[in-house]
Image (cartoon, rainbow, N blue to C red):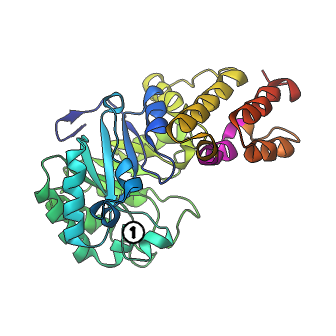
Amino acid sequence: MKIGNIEFPKYPVFLAPMEDVTDIGFRLLCKRFGADMVFTEFVSSDALVREVKKTKEKLTISDEERPVAIQIYGREPDAMVEAAQICESANPDILDINFGCPVKKVAGKGAGSGMLRTPELMLEITKKVVKAVNIPVTVKTRLGWDSDTKIITELAEQLQDCGIQALTIHGRTRAQMYTGEADWTLIGEAKNNPRIHIPIIGNGDIDSAEVCKKRFDETGVDAVMIGRATFGRPWIFQEVKHYLQTGELLPQESFGWYLDVLKQQVNQSVERLDERRGILHIRRHLASSPLFKGIPDFKPTRIAMLRANSVEELFSIMDEIPEKFNLV
């Protein structure tokens, strides 16, 4: 499978773009565990054009994480074009357009998945962005705005005609947000449409190696993108890639091994930001990590971890967990 001149191995698995999650430290960690491509947090075109410092910082990428895509969102064609050109100067391998984010502050203003209500504007923006840059442009979107407007089959053809070089489809409508189950049926229909020749990347509820393989087999998608299942679990890429390559589940590591990976995440976050902000940033991963799920009477320890205000305090709590709960 190729996007532009970038060649991927069989069964490529990508890290999804996620706000406040896919910063450079987390992307590098996921890359280390086998992610075939990583995406930045989504970048506001309006904020980029206004030169907002925090937004411009999201454009920082490293050669170690390549291939890497920068993702932008917005609803004004001129701002999207200008933002695309600013992103191109940061030298990513791919520019991705976000037509899928369902959160109110984005979709409610007509950007992200809000564009599914104005497909003509979506196509106009896509055409203009493709023409404005010299790197491959891709799109990430959803099935439609709601259950009555699942337009993805026709939309996929129209976006392809605009010149995009790959399309990622999340198997929910905007109205669903992240509730219910992702529906991969229409993703498969888009992929198997004889008029579609660009790669189709499937996304939604990939939370294990077995589910990932099943989605590849059932739909024939060219690649799969993993999002929320990476929270507190960057090693999921290692598990998935091993299973896709061998058909066997990767043997479990020790509890301490996984704990050390989470501590590396903490250190990276603190180094990138500072101690206070770094710890706040990492709380989502600690709260969501499957490593701590199912441990009897773990709630007080989880609360203590999430209330820790220093690395020393946090690591002291984490280091006590294996012995305290008899975990190896």
The quadrant holding residue 68 is top left
Q: Is residue 287 magenta?
A: yes
Write the residue at 45% across / 59% down.
Answer: 171
Tell whether 154 sits left or right of 178.
Answer: left
Q: Is residue 267 magenta?
A: no
Category of crowding for the residue at label 1, using alpha-carbon neighbours closer than 10 angstroms: few (below 14), some (14–19), many (at least 20)? many
Give coordinates of residue 97: x percent, y percent.
Answer: 29, 58
Image vertical order of residue 141 relative to residue 78, above or below:
above
Q: Which residues are magenta?
A: 280-291
Q: Which residue is mark 1?
A: 113
The quadrant holding residue 270 is top right
Write the residue at 26% across / 42% down.
Answer: 92
Image vertical order of residue 268 relative to residue 308, above or below:
above
The quadrant holding residue 52 is bottom left
In the picture, the quarter occupied by the N terminus is top left
Kindly state the secondary structure of the residue where label 1 is placed. Answer: helix
In the picture, the quarter occupied by the C terminus is top right
Image vertical order of residue 106 relative to residue 5, above or below:
below
Residue type for callout 1: Ser
Q: Is residue 42 visible in this depiction of the protein? A: no
